[in-house]
Amino acid sequence: MAERVLNRDFRAIHREKAPKENRIKRSPAENFARIFVLVFTLTSLIVLYPLVYTVSAAFTPGNSISNLSIIPFGNGFTLEHYERLF
């Protein structure tokens, strides 16, 4: 019985101290690197989306780009336009 009480007390003390001891300390350089990667990723997505949309328009069935979905290749995939071209 005494052992159970000791284990319970140890766990309670350990839980109280754990968050302070296990806190991750990051340097300003690491924070800058994380922000840089986030900004670079968002910028890349903004720049690449129109290119992917244009390529998907070339392979989408239909004759009008105004009927396309916002999601690239959302309306399907076909080589119909290139068959007529060649």
Image (spheres, rainbow, N blue to C red):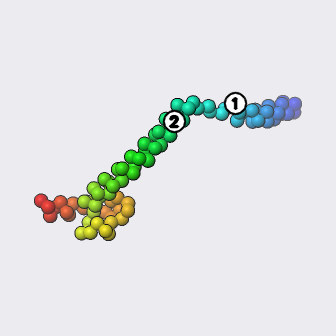
- Residue at 38 percent across and 62 percent down: it is 70
Q: Say the numbered circle drawn on residue 52.
A: none
The secondary structure type at the circle numbered 1 is helix
Residue 7: tell me if it is visible.
Answer: no
Instruction: Out of 80 and 26, give the one closest to the viewer.
Output: 26
- Which residue bears the numbered disc 1? 21
- Residue at 87 percent across and 30 percent down: it is 2
Do residues under tags 1 and 2 come within 8 Å of each other at their CB atoms? no
Instruction: Out of 17 and 8, give the one closest to the viewer.
Output: 17
- Residue at 36 percent across and 50 percent down: it is 47
Query: In the image, is residue 32 above or below residue 85?
Result: above
Report the amino acid beneath label 2.
Phe
Task: Name the quarter where the N terminus is drawn.
Answer: top right
Count of numbered badges drawn on the protein: 2
Task: Name the quarter where the C terminus is drawn.
Answer: bottom left
The CA span between labels 1 and 2 is 24 Å
Q: Which quadrant of the view contains residue 7?
A: top right
Residue 86: tell me if it is visible.
Answer: yes
Q: Say the numbered circle drawn on residue 32.
A: 2
